[in-house]
Structure formats: C-alpha cells, structure tokens
Image: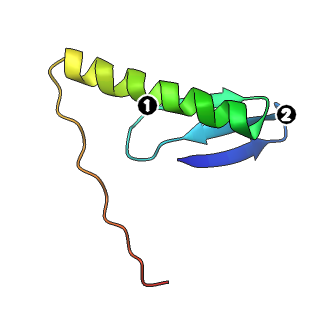
Amino acid sequence: MHIQWRVKDEMYQVTVPELPGCIAVGKTYKEAARHAKEAIKRWVDEQEAAGKALPAPSLYDSSF
C-alpha cells in the first residue's frame, strides 16, 4: 500500500499498485489504512466472483 496525504482534499489516499483501481481514503492515517484493508478484500472478492485470476505478487528487492 502507498499512503499519501492529499493537500487539496485534506485526507489520506491509499493506492495498492498490485491491484489496479484499488483505492481508499480516510481523514486520518489509521482510517485510511483500515479503509484500504476493506478495499483490498472487496477487490479480491470481486475478481474471484468474476472468475478472474489474481495478479502475481511483485518481487521485493531487499538490497537497499
């Protein structure tokens, strides 16, 4: 998850790069993270219900 503060909207926005279109927002960092967790579950459930494959996870480079 990527959590960023949106100055214009005065809220946190969460994007999940591995899940296209999976976005959540919240007035606090904690709220945004909680909403993102719910959005991820919904995104996965919708993909499975549609018979679509889930994307493979990206590889993590721990060299830094």
Gap between marks 1 and 2 measured at Cα: 23 Å
* For marks 1 and 2 on the same chain, the one whose residue lies earlier in the sequence: 2
Q: Position of residue 23 (x, y in %)?
A: 54, 32
Residue at 55% from the left image edge and 32% from the top image edge: 36
Residue type (three-letter) at the residue carrying disc 2? Glu
Number of other residues with Cα within 10 Å of mark 2, as a class: few under 14, some 14 to 19, many 20 or more: few
- Which element is circle 2 on? loop
Please report contact status of discs 1 and 2: CB closer than 8 Å, yes or no.
no
Locate residue 17, reporting x and y percent: 45, 47
Residue at 38 percent of width and 46 percent of height? 18
In the rendered view, tell whether residue 59 sits above or below residue 47: below
Total numbered circles: 2
Task: Judge the density around disc 1: few (<14), some (14-19), many (≥20) Cα neighbours within 10 Å.
Answer: some
Residue 25 has which mark? none
Instruction: Read off the residue under disc 2.
Output: 10
Circle 1 residue: 40
The quarter of the picture where residue 28 lies is top right
Image position of 42 with respect to 12: above or below: above
Give the foreground label among 1 and 2. Answer: 1
Q: At 31% across and 18% down in the image, what residue appears?
A: 46
- Left or right of 52? Residue 13 is right
User: Is 47 left or right of 23, judged from the image as shown?
Assistant: left
- The answer to whether residue 14 is left or right of residue 9 is left
Q: Position of residue 41 (x, y in %)?
A: 40, 26
Q: Position of residue 38 (x, y in %)?
A: 50, 25
How was this image coloured?
A: rainbow
Q: Quadrant of residue 59?
A: bottom left
Res 27 quadrant in image: top right
State the SS at label 1. Answer: helix
Q: Amino acid at mark 1?
A: Ile
